[in-house]
Image (cartoon, coloured by chain):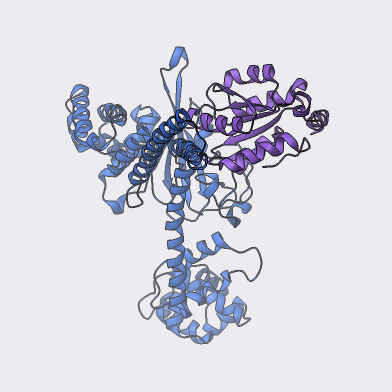
Amino acid sequence: MSEQGRHRQEGAVPAVEAHGRARICLVEDEMAIAEAISFLLEREGWQVELVADGAAAIDAIRRARPDVVILDLMLPGRSGYDILRDIKADPALAGTRVLMLTARGQERDRERAATLGVDRFMTKPFSNTELVGTVRVMLSGPAGEAGG
Amino acid sequence: MREGEARVTTGGEEAADPRGIGRRIRARRRTLGLDQKALASRVGISPAYLSLIENGRRRVPKALGERIAAALDMTPALLFGAGVGAGWEEALATLAGRREPTDPPRPEIAHLGRLVAEYPGWARLILEQGREIEALEARLAILADRLSGDPYLADTLHALLSSVTAVQASADILARTPELAPDEVERFRFNLSVEARRTADRARALIEHFDRSRLDKPLEATTPREEVMALLARHRHHFPAIETAAEDGPAAAREAAGSIAAEIGGALSAEARPLLRAALEQLAEDATALSLSDLAAAIEEVGFDPVQLSARLDLMAARLFRRLVVLEARQEEADRDGLGLVAFDRAGAVLWRHQGEGFALPRLRAACALWPVFRARPDEIGQHQLLTDRGTPIEVWTAVEIRPGAEGVARQIAWQLVRPVPRMAAVPAGDRLVVGASCRLCRRGACPERREPAFFAAPAPAAEAAPLEPD
């Protein structure tokens, strides 16, 4: 917890304020879901980068240094847990918050994601309003407020 | 003891169920606060003789029974247990041992004799409920296996949730965004239609999956190998045509296996059919190696002793085990011991299963790690006396079959033959290893090998009384 806590504190000033337009990286392999989410986020004025492959995700995230990563748990190439672990271990991504999406809402998955330092956890199917609302809170609220 | 006693007083027919009678006498005597000596002198027999009677080791002549009943102020009918099924007391004692609550009041085991004699209706109800619970637990075991160990179900549900998510998100955008550009409308409509179709397909697949596993059908089969094992088990691994053909040599037996595979394989999935054929060819090879009449003759000579049988017949133990199961299938139901046979690869996957009587063999995954099969050694036939978590004494033999494997790594298949010991055979429970089928349904209490909690928290006293068998 201590390392994660430190990261979160460093990221306490949302990066959004620094560069104006919020950047979101969406890691999702189901194209129909990805298109819908991208549309919803872009409509809010946020900048969305889409990654459909688990193996390519961490490089794209390191490059983009997004404010929020929306991360699907079940991905081809690499699991969402591994990507989450990499994000949380990377000091350069200390300000990046992670929303994990999964079709498996079991307590076990939730706990594992929480252990790895996930900021929010959401199960599919979700409502669009709920998703956008959650991302908005993650962008504006104080960092490190995990939940979901 | 005055030796003539029993003979002198043998006036009429002797009553059956001496154990029940003995227990009732002891229970009543203790209720009245009499010691053996006092009661013995009242009815004119020696305390030693009374002790034998109370321990169920002497039948009670009718006249003596009547005298004892009079001395104990109970009716002879009550003492002899009129209207009571044989073995009720044993069955009730087993039930009580299995479900004994941790707090008082606990079942009054000492008064079982009186419960059965005075309240046969209640006794019967308890027994029937016990049996019903057993049946429900067996069903639950299968369903639990199905839900937790069924990768197809998990994958399909995951895919279904994914497409539902896409449908919901796309439909919501279309419904709530009046300012959508025409190409966006087009895109989300397209996605909606594709994902709606996928949702329907996946839902249908799910329904078919459940339909295949309806409760009124056997639930064994979730994988092709499970299908084959279930089918072979329904035939008790016995195919008379193979036995007959085996008399004409290996080629004929193989051919018979082929035609049986064609005949009964129709009910299986296409993937399962080659596995069925391989299993039947194995049975044919076994039949060629040892005829059932030779096996029966050898058992006649040395008894049911796989160690000796294997030596005498110069037969690989795994093959002997399979032949013993086939031989038993040929016998009348009443003469069967209820043999079970199960084989695992070293990764613990079940390769062969022949369910026996009175004990549960592990299914799918997560077998009880205490079963001797997981300690089987290639160079010997292991022989063990165990108790199941339900209190059934069993004998177990293990053997490892070595077959050619991948890249020079030999395949080791561990076999385990299980034979329930008749309940009435006195078994000292104290030093026996207690095994279950799988953790979720095990009644064993403390267990160093437990990897999953049990559905039923009630501790099994037998397990606590039994320290682990030294390895």
Residue A96 left/right relative to B139: right
The one nearer the camera, B336 or A134, is A134
Q: Residue at horizontal 46%, vertical 60%?
A: B133
Percent from the top left, x then y, of residue B17? 42, 69
Is A45 placed left or right of A20 in the picture?
left
- The residue shown at (48%, 47%) is B144
Q: Nearer the viewer, residue B362 or B208?
A: B208
Place residue A85 in its image quadrant: top right
Residue B25, horizontal then vertical, whole percent: 52, 76
Q: Nearer the viewer, residue B434 or B176?
A: B176
Residue B396, compared with residue B465, is above or below; it is above
Percent x, y of residue B382: 49, 34
Q: Which chain did the image draw in blue?
A: B
Tell me if I can see residue B407 in this picture. yes
Q: In the rendered picture of this protein, how many numbered marks are placed on residues?
A: 0
Quarter that holds the C terminus of chain A = top right
Locate residue A51, reporting x and y percent.
57, 22
Residue B449 appears in the figure: no
Query: Does residue B240 sit above or below B42 in this rendering?
Result: above
Q: Quadrant of residue B290?
A: top left
Could you say which is closer to the camera, residue B77 or residue A116?
A116
Q: Quadrant of the N terminus of chain A?
A: top right
* Depicted B25 relative to depicted B339: above or below: below
Q: What hue represents chain A?
A: purple
Q: Residue furthest top?
A: B407
